[in-house]
Image (cartoon, rainbow, N blue to C red):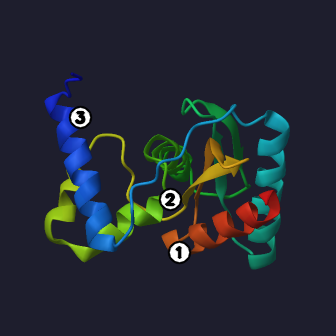
């Protein structure tokens, strides 16, 4: 029988509660081969193009399936604090196999989903999204620099290019 640590049980309970409070199911998706630098560059280019059209400044962070940074791109004049936020959003989306907006929505719903605030490694702010290829997660993207809603718009524009 497999044992689970106290922290592991706490994280599982928090995510399950959050998923229930937002009406989302916990995703059962496998990790695939990690994203290539070439694919990451295409997503970053799409993100930057969209941001330029909106006259926004952003940071793009893309991680592989292990949560390791593959690409970090900072547009001129983007606030420096957004570097760590973009990386954290990408790592959250990859590690927990779901968009970071899911966590933001769970917290907004309140109640027992607020436990998420105590789970290490979760950045509960819109702008992080898993990247899929052939139905498997190959990494994740995190965008920061504007409001979380605007960051989410950039992610959606980038992900539309990857499909």
* Badge 1: residue crowd in 10 Å (few <14, some 14–19, many ≥20): few
Label 1: state its secondary structure. Answer: helix
The quarter of the displayed image where residue 24 is located: bottom left
x%, y% of residue 117? 24, 54
Let me know if residue 99 appears in the view.
yes
Which of the two discs, 3 and 2, sits closer to the camera?
3
Residue at 53% of width from left, 53% of height from top? 82
* Badge 2: residue crowd in 10 Å (few <14, some 14–19, many ≥20): many
User: In the displayed structure, would residue 30 be above or below residue 85?
Assistant: above
Residue at 39% of width from left, 62% of height from top? 25
Q: Which mark is residue 29?
A: none
x%, y% of residue 22? 33, 72
x%, y% of residue 73? 72, 46
Residue at 22% of width from left, 52% of height from top? 14
x%, y% of residue 113? 21, 63
Q: The C terminus is located in which quarter? A: bottom right
Among the two numbered marks 1 and 3 on one chain, the one whose residue lies closer to the N terminus: 3
Question: Is 14 on the left or on the right of 42, as rendered?
Answer: left
Question: Is 70 on the left or on the right of 105, as rendered?
Answer: right
Label 2: state its secondary structure. Answer: loop
Q: Which mark is residue 149?
A: 1
Q: Which mark is residue 8?
A: 3
* Badge 3: residue crowd in 10 Å (few <14, some 14–19, many ≥20): few
């Amino acid at each position: 029988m497999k044992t689970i640590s106290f922290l592991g049980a706490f994280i599982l309970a928090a995510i399950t509660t959050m998923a229930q409070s937002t009406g989302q199911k916990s995703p059962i998706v496998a990790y695939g081969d990690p994203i290539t630098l070439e694919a990451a560059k295409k997503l970053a280019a799409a993100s930057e193009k969209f941001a330029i059209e909106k006259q926004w400044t952003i940071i793009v962070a893309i991680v592989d399936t292990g949560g390791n940074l593959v690409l970090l791109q900072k547009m001129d004049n983007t606030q420096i604090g957004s570097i760590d936020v973009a990386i954290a959003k990408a790592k959250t989306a990859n590690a927990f196999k779901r968009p970071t907006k899911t966590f933001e929505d769970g917290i907004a719903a309140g109640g027992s989903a607020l436990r998420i605030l105590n789970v290490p490694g979760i950045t509960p702010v819109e702008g992080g999204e898993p990247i899929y290829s052939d139905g498997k997660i190959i990494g994740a993207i995190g965008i920061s620099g504007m409001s979380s809603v605007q960051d989410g718009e950039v992610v959606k524009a980038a992900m539309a290019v990857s499909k």
